[in-house]
Image: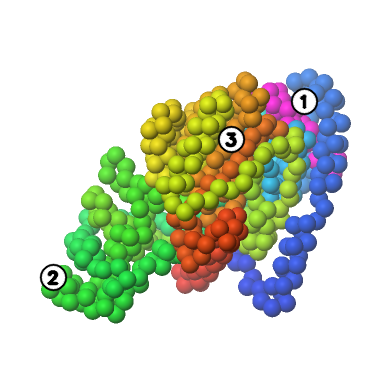
Amino acid sequence: MSDLATNELWSIFDARRVKAPELRGLDLAMNGFVGFYKNRKPVLPRLKAAAERIEKLEPEIHALGSTRFQEEVAEVRNLARLKKLEGPALDRGMAIVREAAWRAVGKRPFPVQLMGALAMCEGLIAEMATGEGKTLTASLAASIWAWSGKPVHIITVNDYLVARDAELMGPVYRMLGLEVGHIVHETTPNDRVGQYRRNVIYCTSKELVADFLRDQIQLGTLRTSVQTAVGMLSQSQARNALMIPGLFRVIVDEADSLLIDEAVTPLIISNSPDDEANSSLYRAAYELAKVMDKDRDFTIDWTIRNVDLTPRGQARIDELAEGNGFWKGKRRREELVTQALVSLHCYIRDEQYLITEDGKVQIIDEFTGRVMADRSWRHGLHQAIEVKEGVPVTADKENLARLSFQRFFRQYPIMGGMTGTAWESAGEMWQIYQRPIVRIPTNKPCIRKHLPVRFFDTMDQKFEAVVQRVCELNDQGAPVLIGTRSVLASLEVSKRLDAAKRAHRVLNATQTKVEADIIAMAGHRGQITVATNMAGRGTDIILSRGVADIGGLNVISTEPHGSGRVDRQLFGRAARQGDPGSAQMFACAEDDLFIRHTKNIRKAWRAIGASNLIRIAQARAERLARFNRKQVLKNDDWMDQAVPF
């Protein structure tokens, strides 16, 4: 077996069973103290000093001819492969990468971008404000790492950004003697093998984790590199089936979204039978659910969107089921009816899911507003919603393998990341991933105006006030970005703007293909853009000429999110790179956040204070989300002990 193949096998299995120690008592307290210290350790002065040293090298590096520049690239690459790219050599290497960015794509990284790249090279999570050039920053760190000869994965949030960033930064990597690849949903298995063996690979977490799980299924019960080497020697076909040649180093873009928000749902590889044998049962359960009375037969826990049957409800199901005679097991029929009730009362079309043109139910990500392609709810909920919407019922899926995002990313020996909003999750980021956060200053001072929260009793009052404010700004010629939590809310705002005869564009989970075009126009004079949460991720809003003179972009949020980080990310769309801009929150007592987490006090918002009520509700929502993520990780660790993958 070749050295390359051996190295790949070791890398796959050395990290395959990584499990964080279960800390208790003094160990847990000490770990928390260490994380608190590392998150507040004064690293910025050191990063700033390094950036200044790199700046001083610029005249010398810039004066190099093409031949001499390539010789310099070869020298630092050799040092990287010998693990000697540190100190002055690292400064020079970063100066060379910076010059390559200027020569290849005409972009000269700012000192704060150098600081962000150096932070990621140290395995830190860099918090960089929206519009500070994180795509270019990631390429600086990835180039330094990739010179060592091991593949570097750059994870971002969707296929569009994967393809865009790989194409945009490709010339930089090629000038540095590196190959760049990317993986999107349409990439074939054969192409993936070659793409994963390039120096820098852009991909989404979903595609990467799914490919990793497919490799684990292929490897079966082999648990160590020695076992695998022997197994592959005796089964030559298995070697060719592996796609990922190990997990070495990773840069996670939008780290809070991928490592925290999406970590609540494990990725599961499953297969589906051709026919749905239980479709008649789901339909029968739905018919029973429709005739059951709320509060008498069942109660709803809005906090977790769940239904609990009352004794009267259980007895009524027994009676109705006996009459229909479609199943006998008490537990099974109660599960089916419960899921039907949940689909009827807790899940709303265009909020938690949408129906595609070809009649499929697709889940909408609560945090990004994007469609989660190829995802489905478990335990019959997806089928219950399909019955509710009158679309073809898909088959129950058989799980083949599962893995949480927390557990997967802990397998990388070296991980860096970047995002516009990470500080609020500093404790969890350390507890789960042992990654400190450093807050990188902006290139230019931020002059965003945060206007007071406006709170109302009803949804109708809130939307009326939103449209009134938008019209005021539009009359002045100022561009407005209206952020909504759901597709349904975006359509409601759009309908009211139509009634007010205000031209606007809508960006939600049903328009992802034209996202870049819509966002590119959002900073133009007089433009009104209605968008779900996706507006805050990955694409820049650049002001057109004269817009800065009338106050810049105005961001209006129509509803607080379960995490304050998402609100801050949306507000970060305004006032990028020293531009003027404003941000304001509109909310009401009927918003989902307050119904689920402050049901008993939401109508007393005048006494409590609007901002205080939002803080209370978000604190409860984030506490529940942390608990759910912890449970996912516990289940994943248990599964690792119980099954071979």
Q: Is residue 95 magenta?
A: yes
Q: Earlier in the sequence, mark 2 or mark 1?
A: 1
Label the magenta part by its dominant secondary structure: helix
Which residue is the site of mark 1?
69
Q: Is residue 416 magenta?
A: no
Q: Position of residue 329 (x, y in %)?
A: 23, 76
Circle 1 — which element? helix
Q: Which residues are magenta?
A: 87-109
- In this picture, residue 128 sits left or right of residue 634: right
Q: Position of residue 53 (x, y in %)?
A: 86, 36
Amino acid tagged 2:
Asn
Which residue is the site of mark 3?
554
What's the CA distance linking mark 3 and mark 2?
58 Å
Which residue is the site of mark 2?
324
Residue at 67% from the left image edge and 39% from the top image edge: 449
| Marks 3,2: beta carbons within 8 A | no
- In this picture, residue 216 sits left or right of residue 444: left
